[in-house]
Amino acid sequence: MFKVVIKDQININTILILSTIFLFALILLSLPESEAADNARDVLVMYAGSLVKIFENDIVPSFSNQTGLNLVGEGKGSVQISNMILDGFRRPDVFLSADTLPIEKLINHNPPLAHWFVNFASGEIVIAYNPNSPFAYDLQRASKGEIPWYQVLEEKGFKFRRTDPELDPKGYYTIIVAKLANLYYNDSAIKDRILGEDRNKEQIFPEEILKSILESGQIDAVAAYKHEAIARGLPYITLPSQINLGDPRYSSFYNQASYTEGMNNTIHGKPILFSYTIPDTVRNINGAISFAKYLISPAGKALLTSVGLNPVKPIVGGDSKTLQPEIKALIQ
């Protein structure tokens, strides 16, 4: 009798589980068509963490108003995004990178996870600071060129922070800028005095939270892109064109400084160019193409200019033959 009871209980539990699954399936099948349509309009974009404010406050509403598509975005360091795609942790429709190298990692992978990239805007490195910092007076003087900017960052107790060069292009750009400062000011110790080791644990914070920490007053200044400072309304120090990586005329000078990643890959200084690709992880190809076209359209360029980025003539890298015709038509 005991065994019969157990068997009957197992049968009852099985029936209950199957019934629940069946009811859940009916619910899914009965969802309104409008909900399915909403999912079809979603475009998943992984983007450089420095674009968080611009993406959420400007790009998303502008693009959605023009196309009726929904941008679903996630911002992280560009190298980190590339690694996440390679490891299968993310499957974006579009990838916006703060450099071409993270996209090239996808292109050079075996098998390739991307085939081309398009440069769409340039940027430059600045020192963004908290206006309520105890060092605000000296930072303001540095922004006017009255005292050297690096001397302020060297002051005792000054809290300067930056991103990880192994995860974020801005991290290695900051190191390259500091090394260029050594050359430009003829002082070989500037980089060591303001940054210390390349991966100084005391200075490195995740890209996604660095500006929030600055705004909260926990630190005094950060290495930032000019457009980040403008988007957040932060005061900033403009660095000389010879070291800020924002002027193509100084490409040869920029190339004199470099950073070597943990995998012994040497990255040389060069003008900062923001790029995008549609990786092979794309699910909404039509939405991805629409967004890629928007970024290099007159409306997209106007928006980028308004938020402190400098639109550039789109240049294709990688295998241009694989570029979607709809995007290629706007570049030629």
Image (tube, rainbow, N blue to C red):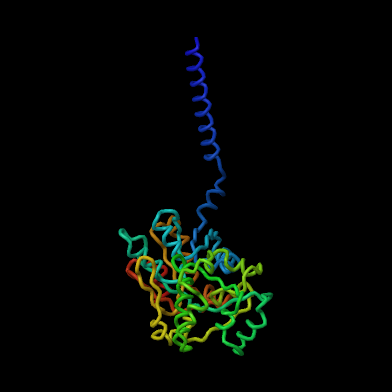
Lateral position of residue 56 relative to residue 246, left or right = right
Residue positioned 55% across, 53% down in the render? 38
Which of the 4 image quadrants contains residue 323? Answer: bottom left
Q: Is residue 5 visible?
A: yes
Q: Position of residue 276 (x, y in %)?
A: 44, 68
Nearest the camera: 96 or 87? 87
Q: How many marks?
A: 0
- The outermost residue toward the front is 156
Vertical relation: 154 (above or below) 281: below
Lateral position of residue 62 relative to residue 111, left or right = right
- The outermost residue toward the left is 110
Q: Position of residue 277 (x, y in %)?
A: 42, 66
- Quadrant including the C terminus: bottom left
Q: Is residue 230 visible?
A: no
Lateral position of residue 173 relative to residue 306, left or right = left
Nearest the camera: 323 or 221? 221
Residue positioned 45% across, 83% down in the render? 180
Q: Position of residue 79 (x, y in %)?
A: 44, 65
Nearest the camera: 29 or 149? 149
